Image (spheres, grey):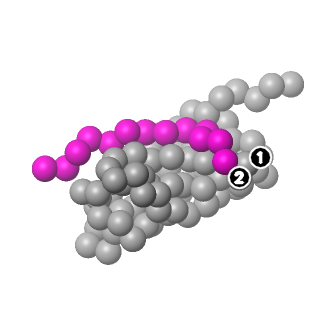
Amino acid sequence: MRRPGPRSSLSVIAHPWGTETVLVIAGAEPGAAYDGVLVTAAGDQVVSGSFLGTEEPLDCEMNAAVRRADVAEILLVETRGSTWARATLPPVD
């Protein structure tokens, strides 16, 4: 049986200490590990945390030590390295 693809809501909150990633995820492989990765405009990748897929939708927050103004994209990456979900963020003026 094939599992449905990702259904996610990815957003961020700027804090003085870094960027908080807010995730609402459904469709992740139960028990599989995923990394939340923030990608800067320069292409650097900063891991903001990880989670295990669940049968039920999950709602979690993760933090990374990178300024929101520097973040261009959010990736959810499977342990084998493939991007499972992504969101491009608008630039901050």
- Please say if 54 is above or below 19: above
What amino acid is at disc 2?
Thr
Per the image, the residue denoted by label 1 is: 30
Picture coordinates of residue 29 (x, y %)?
A: 75, 42
Picture coordinates of residue 76 (x, y %)?
A: 56, 47
Outermost bottom residue:
17
Q: Is tag 2's residue or tag 1's residue first in the polypeptide sequence?
A: 1
Per the image, the residue denoted by label 2 is: 79
What amino acid is at disc 1?
Pro
Q: Nearer the viewer, residue 87 or 27?
A: 87
- Please say if 89 is above or below 40: above
Picture coordinates of residue 46 (x, y %)?
A: 47, 62
Q: Nearer the viewer, residue 86 or 21?
A: 86
Q: Is residue 29 left or right of residue 34?
A: right
Q: Is residue 92 left or right of residue 87?
A: left
Which residue: 61% across, 48% down? 77
Q: The magenta stretch spans which residues?
A: 81-93
Q: Is residue 56 magenta?
A: no
Q: Nearer the viewer, residue 9 or 36?
A: 36
Quadrant in which the N terminus appears:
top right
Which residue: 57% across, 33% down? 7
- Separation (CA) of disc 2 from disc 1: 13 Å
